[in-house]
Amino acid sequence: MDSANRSKVIVADDHPLFREALIHAVGKVLEGAAVIEAESLESLQAVVDTNADADLLLLDLNMPGVSGFSALAWIRKNQAALPTIVVSAIDDPAVMRRALRHGASGYIPKSSSISDIEAGIGAVLDGEVWLPEGVDPDGGNLDAEEAGVAEALSTLTPHQFRVLMMLGEGLLNKQIAYKLNVSEATIKAHVTAILRKMGVTNRTQAVLAVQQLGVAEPALAEGEAG
């Protein structure tokens, strides 16, 4: 296949073994597809930005540096043309429907069989919405506050979004500046802009707002990967 015409899929998951399973499934559905991997918020933002022509994004719901639906909401608003399937250890139908309301085109539980993963990928690539068999996609609209937070997130720049996620981890301006290799003054400027765009007056309120997009992870058995 001509490299210029190859399908391109982004696989974003922090667990190498599950990334490998997703890549295998992609290869079965799209023979010869180019697969770009991401394992954190920073790498996800980088590959989405540099691969605007990607055909599909497979997005882990809870990657390092991300809170719940926050990354999905931000990406769907900033890359509206990129079909996105959420992959997650959470198999709650209410969470699946919530993902669709945030703009996902499909939802694949990590407990799914390889054949179901392939079916989900194929369906979304064909322009359909895909959920596991028996899950009704209808019902469960987002409440006004959650929808408002998602809309506010969409106005943040990539750096501002990363800073907000780090605020949610409880990091101080100085710690964030060190991690991002910028000055503390730059972080203060980002925080000021974040508060204005989020319509709040302090960082605590901003963090509480983002928590509305959170999703409780299922308890894992000892030694089990999520």
Image (cartoon, rainbow, N blue to C red):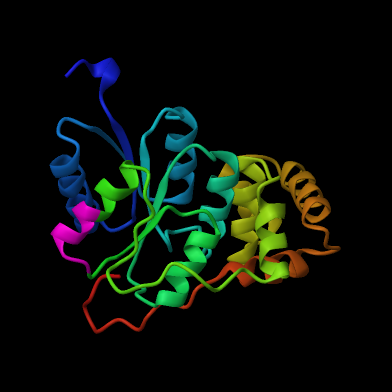
Predominant SS of the magenta segment: helix
Give how far across and how far down residue 8 sits, in percent: 31, 32
Mark count: 0
Figure quadrant of residue 155: top right
Q: Is residue 37 magenta?
A: no
On the picture, is 154 further left or further right than 118? right
Q: Is residue 1 visible?
A: yes
Residue nearest the observer in this picture, 167 or 113: 113
Residue 68 position in % (x across, y down): 51, 66
Rendered residue at 17%/49% (across/down): 25
Residue 64 is left or right of residue 130, and the answer is right
Q: Which residues are magenta?
A: 112-119
Side (left or right) of 168 relative to 14: right
Query: Residue shown at 33%/56% (left/top)?
Result: 14
Q: Position of residue 88 (x, y in %)?
A: 35, 65
* Percent of width and height locating residue 226: 30, 70
In the image: residue 99, left or right of residue 194: left
